[in-house]
Amino acid sequence: MDAVRHFLHEWRLVLLVIHVGVTSAMIVVILLQRSEGGGLGMGGRSDALFSVRGQANILSRMTAIFASIFFFLSLLMAWSMTDPGRAAKSIMDRAPVGSGAPAAPGSMAPSPTAPAAPTQPAAPTR
């Protein structure tokens, strides 16, 4: 699996260009579909292939195909960019270890580094 991941990592620019092409094609197909308001002027023809029903079937199938390819390429690129050695580490592995633990709930003794207790505010003068 690491060989496949390494191969895809080296071909990331090609995958990105294909991904952008599929994205652009999907946008065009979605914009060509007829909406409630009449679409982008794709009416008026009475061909069996481009009738209202035929056009909706073809364009909806093309949208589903492009969306599936888009989803697959997105997952493939995300998977190929991960580093297996880095993914196993946790942020808690880099946390400092030592006396950073909070004080016990019952102890109210001031620590040597704690700031002094605030004093009473001065009485207002007139």
Image: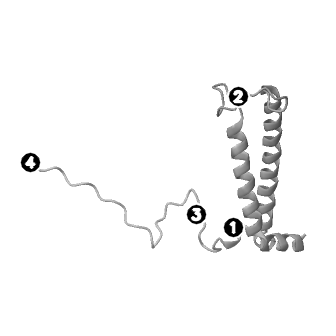
Front label number (3 vs 2): 2
Q: Position of residue 33 (x, y in %)?
A: 72, 35
Mark 3 Cα shell of 10 Å, populated few (<14), some (14-19), many (≥20): few
Looking at the image, is mark 4 or mark 1 earlier in the sequence? Answer: 1
**Of circles 4 and 1, which is in front?**
1
Quadrant including the N terminus: bottom right
For badge 2, the amino acid type reads: Gly
Give the secondary structure at mark 2: loop
Nearer the N terminus, badge 2 or badge 1? 2
Return the residue at label 2.
Answer: 43
Q: Which numbered disc flags the more N-terminal residue, 3 or 2? A: 2
The mark that comes first in sequence, 3 or 1, is 1
* Disc sitting over residue 102 in the figure: 3
What residue is at 18 percent from the left and 51 percent from the top? 123
Q: Amino acid at mark 1?
A: Met
Q: According to the image, label 4 marks what residue?
A: 126
Disc 4 + disc 1, Cβ < 8 Å? no
> Which residue is label 1 attached to?
92
Query: Residue type at mark 3?
Result: Pro
Question: Label 2: few (<14), some or many (≥20) within 10 Å?
Answer: few
Sequence-first disc among 3 and 4: 3
Question: In the rendering, which numbered label is found on residue 105?
Answer: none
Q: Position of residue 58 (x, y in %)?
A: 82, 36
Do labels 3 and 1 touch, CB within 8 Å?
no
Distance in Å between CA atoms under marks 2 and 4: 85 Å
Q: Position of residue 83 (x, y in %)?
A: 77, 71
In the picture as drawn, the residue positioned furthest to the left comes out as 126
